[in-house]
Every structure is written in structure tokens, then in C-alpha cells.
Amino acid sequence: MNNNRNIIIDYLARVEGEGSLFIKMKDDLVQDVELKIIEPPRFFEALLRGRAFGDAPDITARICGICPVAYQMSAVHAMEDACGVRVEGRLRALRRLLYCGEWIESHTLHIYMLHSPDFLGYSSVWQMAQDYPDVVQRGLQMKKAGNAIIEFLGGRAVHPVNVKVGGFYKVPMQQEFVSLAEQLRRGRDNALETVRWVAQLPFPDFQQDYEFVALGHPDEYPMNEGRVISNKGLDITAREYDDHFIEEQVPYSNALHSRLKGRGAYMTGPLARYNLNFNRLSSLAREAARSVDMDATCRNPFKSIIVRSIEVLYAFDEALRLIEQYEMPEQSCVSLQPRNATGYACTEAPRGLLYHRYTIDEHGIIRDARIVPPTSQNQKMIEQDLRGYVARIIQLPDDELTWKCEQAIRNYDPCISCATHFLRVHIERA
């Protein structure tokens, strides 16, 4: 009897990008797991070389339509670092508000449209909407609120155009926030209900001993800036990133795999931020977490959907705080002059830590660029999760096993285009 079996899924919706997964099993043991990114490289770093440093925010925003703000913010912070300038005060607060908008729209898209169908047994949100129309409508309204922040401050909801090195091209007057604030107050109520709803989903009992890596900030839940920290002793500046992290090419993927030197795979993203910064959440977000029995520590990657919902609630709460305290800056940007230098920055994209490094000359021309997105950082950890998880459910029929593997990958909300359509799954049983 031939016990070899192959399963191929040509296309998996509800993630962004193209890739495949190969799992080889023999005698009910997992032999190999390969997360293959088959989308061709996009060469954004090469595209940036030779361009003016002020072009970086607009170019990097095109890396991703879901999280363009993260790329813009990392680019402007790194360029300002190269120029020896820090943007503080009211302009910094506006940047944080813009980031809140992206967290809301990106996380809400993932929670309602991409991941919750897995837990409820649907192949798409369109099927889910037949049975949960009010739930899906709530998600759409929340995403619309996040988009409204980005459009209001960024000029448009996708690939915003109002961000520049040093600040913004234009800043709003205080009275312009009135209608937006009302929309966000409704969104905050929906976000609280979202935490309660996702906490009732069925979660596998799966724990891992992760090294969580995220930004840490002494005064706030990290978004735009902070030190790079971990639960296992890492505590560095963005300038030291290259000394501690390395990217490697693997033969089966077009995307580089990142690891901590001498330590291996690590996790970045909402679960890492939550575990490292729980006490920096707003009181409303902390209370909501505790109300659904979420401790300050969570090592179950499937519960990342709960953590995302808590971060959405926090982002609404933080956005409203920033609006209530807003005073119009005297200038829309700070003045700066390029110099021959290298600038570094790390920010927290919705999916995790995002690193940018740029070298510019005295004329402001970009001579070198390096961008490390969160999905490429998580790839090794995704593979490690799959090895551990598949070993527990290896006796399942291939169709059910495939479904579970896809769900485990979607725990990370991978944005594969950022890292280089997904997913072709190939399971080999020997």
C-alpha cells in the first residue's frame, strides 16, 4: 500500500502575498517544514538609492497598501536621525494619531475579514457574513474609522501623501477634529465589544517558549519609537540593530529569514508588544483584557486575535486622548539640513517591529537603504510553530490538517509582499 500523500492548495485567501508551505512527515513524525515565499523580490531598497532623502516617505508607503504609515514613519524617523533632528511635541502627537489609524484599520481587517472565519469554520468572510451580518458590519465600521484617521491626517486612506521628513505638509485646526472624534467614540464602543466577541472563539491549547521582541518605551505603549527589547534580556537602540540581528537567504524562499545572532528565531508583533508592554496599555484596555481572562503574559499564538482586539481598543482610546489634548502646531514641520550620515529607526507596524536604515550624503541623496519588515522576521518562528503544532495534530486527515496549518500561519497576519499570493500547501507523508 502506498502511504505517500501530497496535498496542494493553489491559493489561500485571507493573507497578503504569494507563497507556499511544504510539510514532510514520515512515520507520524514531522520531518521538515518550509514556508516558501514565491512572490518575486520588489527591490524597494535599490529603488531608493540615488533618490532624494525627502522622497523616502512616498516611495516606502508603496511597499504596502495595508500598512503604509508604518513604512512612512520608519523612513522619516531614520532620515531625521541621519540629519540629527528629533520631531517632538505636537507634531509627534499627530504622528502617533496617524499610527493609531493604521493599527485600527489593519487589525480590524485581520480580525474580522481574515482570521475569525478560521475559528468559526468558514472559508471566507462572505460565507461568515451570511450567519453573522451584524458582526461583519461592526468590523467594517471600525475599519472605516481607522481609514478616516489616515485620510484626515494623511490626505488619503491608502498610501497617504501628507507625511514628510520633519513633519507634515499641512496640519489640521482643532475644530476640524469634531466629526472624527464622534466617529472614534462609536468605534471605541465597538472595539470593546470586539474584545468580548473574539475571546469567546475556540482556541487550541498550544503554548510556546518564545523570545518576544518589540519596542519598549518608558511612558507609553510603543508605536513610533523606543528601545528594542525582549523578554530574554535584549535591550538595544535601533542603531545597534545590525549588531544583534541577521538576515539569511534560504534556498526555498525569495524572502530573507531573520534571526537573533546566537539565539535563533523570535516573535515580533502584537503578542510580543502585549507581553512586553502590558502595563503601558490604557486602563480601559487593561480592564478589557482582564475581563476576558487575559493575563499580562500570553504564549498561545492563536490568542493573538484577542491581543489584536485589545490593541484596537487601545488605539481608539489613545486616538481620542490625542484629539482631546490637541493644539495646532505653530509650524507643520521642523527645518533640517541633510548631511553625510547614516540614520536608523524602528517603529511598530501592526504586524511587528519594522527596521529602516539609510545612508545619505551631504546633498541628501540616498546612497544605501535597508528595510527589514516584520513578516520576514517572523518567518522562522512561523516554521517553528508549525513543527510543534503539526506534531500534536498529525493524525488528522489531510484536509483538516491543512486547514489547521493555514490557521496557524494566519496567527501572524503575514504580509508577504512586504517581505519580498499565498498559500500553496504541500503535505508529504512517507
Image (cartoon, grey):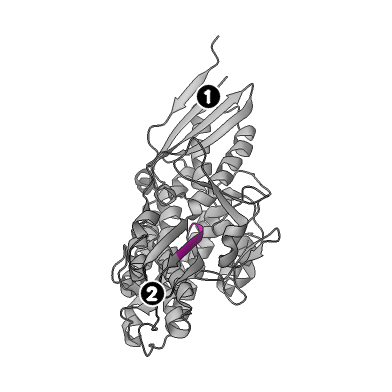
Percent x, y for residue 87?
46, 80
Q: Nearer the viewer, residue 69 or 319?
A: 69
Q: Position of residue 20 (x, y in %)?
A: 44, 36
Q: In the shown orientation, is residue 345 left or right of residue 277?
A: left
Residue denoted by label 2? 165
- The crowding category of the residue bearing disc 1, from other C-alpha atoms within 10 Å (few below 14, some 14 to 19, many at least 20), is many
Counting residues from the start of the chain, the first of labels 2 and 1 encountered is 2
Reading the image, the residue beneath label 1 is: 428
Please identify the dominant SS of the magenta region.
strand
Residue 140 seen in this snapshot: yes
Taking the magenta stretch, the answer to whether it contains residue 33 is no
Tell me the quadrant of the picture where the N terminus can be found. top right
Residue 188 in which image quadrant: bottom left
Part of the protein shown in magenta: 351-358
> Helix, strand or loop at disc 1?
strand
Above or below, 60 relative to 79? above
Q: Residue at x 55, y 69 (%)?
A: 222
| Residue 353 among those drawn in magenta | yes
With 232 as the anchor, is 67 left or right in this view? left
Q: Callout 2: helix, strand or loop?
A: loop
Residue at 38% from the left image edge and 32% from the top image edge: 10
Residue at 70% in and 58% down: 232
For the C terminus, which image quadrant?
top right
